[in-house]
């Protein structure tokens, strides 16, 4: 199904695999609309599709015809994308895979905060709804702690990707592993809310919690004209960021690497790294960050 080439619609109740996994029931699109698409609210439409390649691509393709606040959710993504063109895939109905269309009226230099804002909103909403302590890996990964042979291990359970769409739109996508089992993990470093012993893995209230939290943070941030300090976003991100205070290796464009301690998030949303051996500080705006263990 490619909703960007036709009308969006809900999964058919006659679909042969709609209830194929009773532990993973489908989302209730009508109930989600009633709860989230409200007069005066940010969310203006919400569609659920059975499967698609990428909700980000589909929503971006239709951005010119949609109002701010459009939400597209897929029960399964077959070509989900993360940062640096990495793929994101998971079994049908095992997670939350959705994108939102936003049109923030803030100075261009503050737009880099939007994926970080989404991380704060998702972590806040999921901590309440799932009862799981979540942390953020700069710039846009969601981490949980999963019991392992050496004690609790930090695992990635979600990722965020923001892309421009049309003249004034930004599509922000979020993929979150909810009920993924250990034998379904795509890589050993992945996790899920279920593996982190969440008190709830019911995706309907989890999605509501994330979108409500995202609306609250987005309104606060845009009301402050995107100012991360005035809106409280910079402080909130730093408080929940597992990268700060850690030894890291930043793999930067141009095959350059930077090793040191992550010491701050600056006003532009960049990660400030104090180079090892007293080599000064550098603000990293783009790159892949590796959390180093003491022996690395």
Image: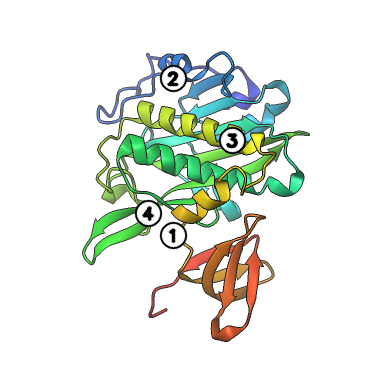
Q: Secondary structure at mark 1?
A: loop
Among numbered discs 4 and 3, the one appearing first in the sequence: 4
Q: Is residue 197 left or right of residue 51?
A: left
Residue extending furthest toward the left? 149
> Which type of secondary structure does the marked residue at label 2 adopt?
helix
Question: Circles 1 and 2: CB distance less than 8 Å?
Answer: no
Quarter where residue 176 is shown: top left
Residue named by callout 3: 220
Q: Nearer the viewer, mark 3 or mark 1?
A: 3
What label sits on residue 242 in the rendered view? 1
Q: Residue furthest front?
A: 230
Q: CA distance from mark 1 to mark 2?
A: 32 Å
Crowdedness of circle 4 by 10 Å Cα count: few (<14), some, many (20+)?
many
Give the number of the mark in front: 3 or 2. 3
Percent coordinates x, y for residue 203 in the rendering: 36, 30
Residue placed under numbered mark 2 in the picture: 32
Residue topped by disc 4: 190
């Amino acid at each position: 199904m490619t909703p960007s080439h036709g009308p969006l619609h809900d999964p058919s109740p006659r679909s042969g695999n709609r209830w194929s996994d009773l532990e993973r029931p489908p989302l209730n699109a009508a109930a989600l609309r009633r709860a989230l698409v409200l007069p005066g609210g940010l969310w203006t439409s919400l569609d659920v599709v059975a499967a698609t390649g990428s909700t980000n691509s589909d929503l971006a393709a239709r951005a010119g015809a949609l109002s701010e606040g459009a939400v597209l959710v897929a029960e399964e993504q077959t070509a989900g994308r993360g940062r640096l063109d990495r793929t994101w895939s998971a079994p049908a109905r095992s997670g939350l895979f959705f994108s939102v269309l936003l049109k923030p009226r803030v100075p261009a230099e503050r737009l880099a905060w939007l994926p970080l804002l989404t991380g704060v909103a998702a972590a806040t909403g999921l901590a309440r709804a799932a009862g799981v302590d979540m942390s953020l890996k700069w710039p846009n990964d969601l981490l949980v702690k999963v019991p392992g042979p050496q004690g609790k291990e930090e695992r990635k359970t979600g990722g965020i990707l923001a892309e421009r769409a049309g003249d004034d739109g930004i599509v922000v996508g979020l993929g979150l592993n909810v009920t993924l089992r250990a034998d379904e993990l795509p890589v050993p470093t992945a996790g899920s809310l279920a593996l982190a012993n969440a008190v709830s893995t019911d995706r309907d209230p989890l999605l509501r919690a994330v979108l409500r939290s995202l609306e609250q943070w987005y309104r606060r941030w845009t009301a402050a004209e995107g100012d991360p300090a005035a809106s409280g976003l910079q402080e909130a991100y730093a408080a929940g960021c597992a990268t700060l205070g850690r030894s890291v290796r930043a793999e930067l464009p141009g095959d350059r690497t930077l090793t040191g301690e992550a010491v701050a998030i600056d006003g532009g949303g960049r990660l400030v790294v104090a180079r090892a051996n007293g080599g000064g500080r550098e603000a990293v705006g783009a790159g892949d960050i590796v959390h180093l263990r003491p022996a690395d």
